[in-house]
Amino acid sequence: MKRNLLIGGSFVALLVTLAVAQSAVQRVAAAQAQNGVMAPRFEVDPTFPKPLPNGWYQGQTIGLWVDAQDHVWIVHRPDVLDAAEGASSQTPPTGECCSVAPPILEFDQTGNLLRHWGGSDGPGYQWPDSNHGLNIDSRGNIWIGGNGAMDGHVLKFTLDGKFVMQVGKKGVTRDSLAQDHFFQVAKTFFHGPSNEVFVADGYGNRRVAVIDAESGQMKRFWGAYGKPPDDKAALAQGPYDPTVTYQQFRGPVHCADVSNDGLVYVCDRTSNRLQIFKTDGTFVKEVYIARDSRADGAVWDTAFSRDPQQKYLYVADGRNQKVRIFDRQSMEELTNFGKGGHYPGEWYSLHNIATDSKGNLYTVETYQGRRLQRFLYKGIAPVRAKQQGVPWPSGK
Amino acid sequence: MPVPRRVVYCWVLVLSGVIAVQYDAATQGPKGGPRYQVDPWWPRPFTNQSWVLGSVTGVTVDAQNHIWVVHRGGDSLEANEKGMMLTPPSATLCCQAAPSVLEFDQKGVLVSNWGGPGQGYAWPQSPGSLAVDAKGNVWITAAGLETPPATPARGRGDAVVGEAPAATGRGRGGPPPGPGDAHVLKFSRDGKFLLQIGTPGKIDGPDSQTTLNRPSAVAFDTAANEVFIADTGNRRIVVVDADKGMYKRHWFAYGEKAAGAAPPAYAPNDPPAKSFRDVTCIDIARDGQVYVCDRSSNRIQVFRKDGTFVKETVVSKNTLGATVTGQFGVVSSHGSAWDLAFSNDAEQRYVFVANGHDKKVHILQRDTLAPVATFGSGGRYPGQFLAVGSIAVDGQGNVYAGEHHHGKRVQKFVSK
């Protein structure tokens, strides 16, 4: 009996010890969470997409969108394959691999390639010299831009690749005041309520341009701080200095995405800033991100979380190779994830991001990255680190 | 590179039955040979979030079943991917080169790292492969940088309007200063320098008993205490003593004792070249046969340890190549036989051949050298390759493949 009591007592003591230890663990975890900050959590999914068929090799991938069926569309640059990568496309072939894939590729949710098209001129339109940006409107049309040396246009197709409209033309030069063309467009964004397309214009021009989605007519445009763009002043701004507040977009103007509450988020990539406007071009505020960044800049693209309020803004930082998660109201950065490299959850050069209806995040990479990746949305969770690194699934 | 003999014996005792079953089951697959699938969860991301791999030149497995990797480091990174190494830095969080020599455990966790210049030796301008001997010492060859061709082919990747990566500070490529690579280095497993064979910048021709010329790989005969060196620039195999590096013997293609002329560029319908074009691998099977890759000749030659020629096979007859100048120098992608490794079953029934230009791994039957299967394809996704140039097998039969040039990964493949 006494022995049983002793055992029982030991058992209770053990339980108490365990409970104390458990609560200590929880306290540490809570302390590690950044003062109760909550943010969307993601895990990288290396099973998506499946390798391309036909020995096709994906080039620099510089446009991304998710359609109403949650199919993932990308545009890439097939022509950047060098002679070592595109060995089977050489004349004569020097090896068994690889050949170029068409520039527009559609993937279903399991990562299978569906439709694929594009790459050449057709009746009434000129294919860009250098593909750039992809957006799908609510009527099921696909919009692309181009940042080749001569590209001054955007193109509208059906999802099957049937030509609908060209706005602007090839063979133009820089003119941020032009009414009838663009110069080296980075991205387009269809805004349903106004049936307008916001054009990030771009690599050559230094403005946001807004056109009617049916007629292509220019409706308005603006430069940094909502003022008229001034190309001469923009070009005179000189090498980047993180202490200077630039009055013109340094460019490339790399995104112009519109939220449900009517704010336009504009990526001024090499100024390392987002400028936020009303849809009429009224300047609201600006936010600097990794302002010490140089070279090709830190603010490449944005995407909204899929809750109705779009509580979170995701920003692609292709200089530091991070997806940065902001609270959209305060524009405070809550956390970031990812790192440099070529493995799952890493980027060589993060170029675009987009979300699907379930909140999953997709990324594409340019330069020597050349991948589409998926990050599975795992709900809102306590932020445990300001810099999460690769969002590795627990248990892997 | 082979698994050192000691570990192979241990694992074979434990696993030979299992492996045999796996292989027999696998041979019922559509391609009639062993089948592999990528493990995308290996390795674990570096704890240091700013580290990235450069061009991987070597991978091997040691007696503890740890995976060793050597890569070119910052010299092979574009300005874009080494923002923290530029002056001034272009980024604060990404990236910089990981140390040159990396040791991973089976889970893919980085357990040690070292490498770079030090007292008493010259770190390679570009490492070749690495190998760990039975005593646990790490050998690294100084394989040298690729030389530019007369008429470079060029892709458009470096010249996109508005996206040309900034070339500032040390971001621009170009060979590091110092004499050319002509040596082999031996370190303890924790990176202490032990021995240098050959002298950087000193090249005395293919009959030299004291010098090497851009050696690519080494293999060990533990019982004889000998090191076999693929002496690429001299188009020969050299055997030296493992402790002092003293010369013992050498031979050329087909076991010839006299150096032949350098062959012309490979052409599929020409008769086989009498000399090696570029000997980039050497591995000794458990039965004592010595396997050598003649990379751009698309062939593997097999010898006895004394240099007697046994046989040869062509891996992919029609594979040619391309030389591309990029931001970090010359990318030379030629041929189908870049590196090889043996399967870990008792008989070493299979040979895995890294075919860098065609971006896949061939599996040959070792006794006949007949092709039985391939795995991998060209691309940047898990399980795909760019310039797969190094390969190794661990004690459980898993295959590790390293990517050179812009690939910059080591991937793990498991038998399925």
Image (cartoon, rainbow, N blue to C red):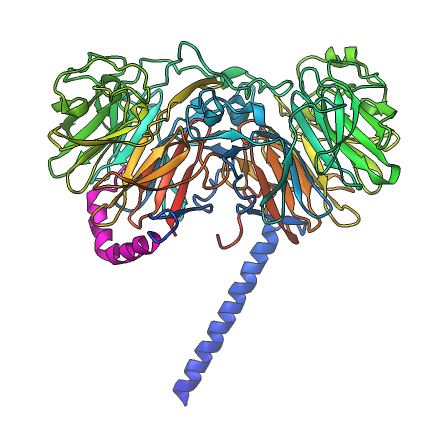
Residue B262 percent location from the top left of the image: 25, 14
Residue A226, position as x, y percentages in the image: 85, 25
In this figure, what is the number of numbered marks? 0
* Camera sees residue B247: no
Assign the magenta stretch its main secondary structure.
helix
Residue at 16% over, 17% down: B210
Q: Is residue A305 above or below residue A123?
A: below
| In-image side of B255 versus A115 (left or right) | left
Q: Is residue A193 above or below residue A202?
A: below
Q: Quadrant of the N terminus of chain A?
A: bottom left
Residue B138 horizontal side relative to residue A156, left or right? left
Tell me, yes or no, whether the highlighted magenta stretch contains residue B19: yes
Residue A308 rendering spot, x and y as whole percentages: 79, 49
Residue B164 screen position, x and y as percent: 59, 19
Q: Which residues are magenta?
A: B1-26
In this rendered view, identify the residue nearer to me: B87 or A213. A213
Residue drawn at x 29%, y 54% as measured from the top left: B19
Most foreground residue, B55 or B300: B300
Residue A27 appearing in the image: yes
Q: Is A233 covered by the magenta stretch?
A: no
- Which quadrant holds residue B383? top left
Residue for point 24% across, 36% down:
B137
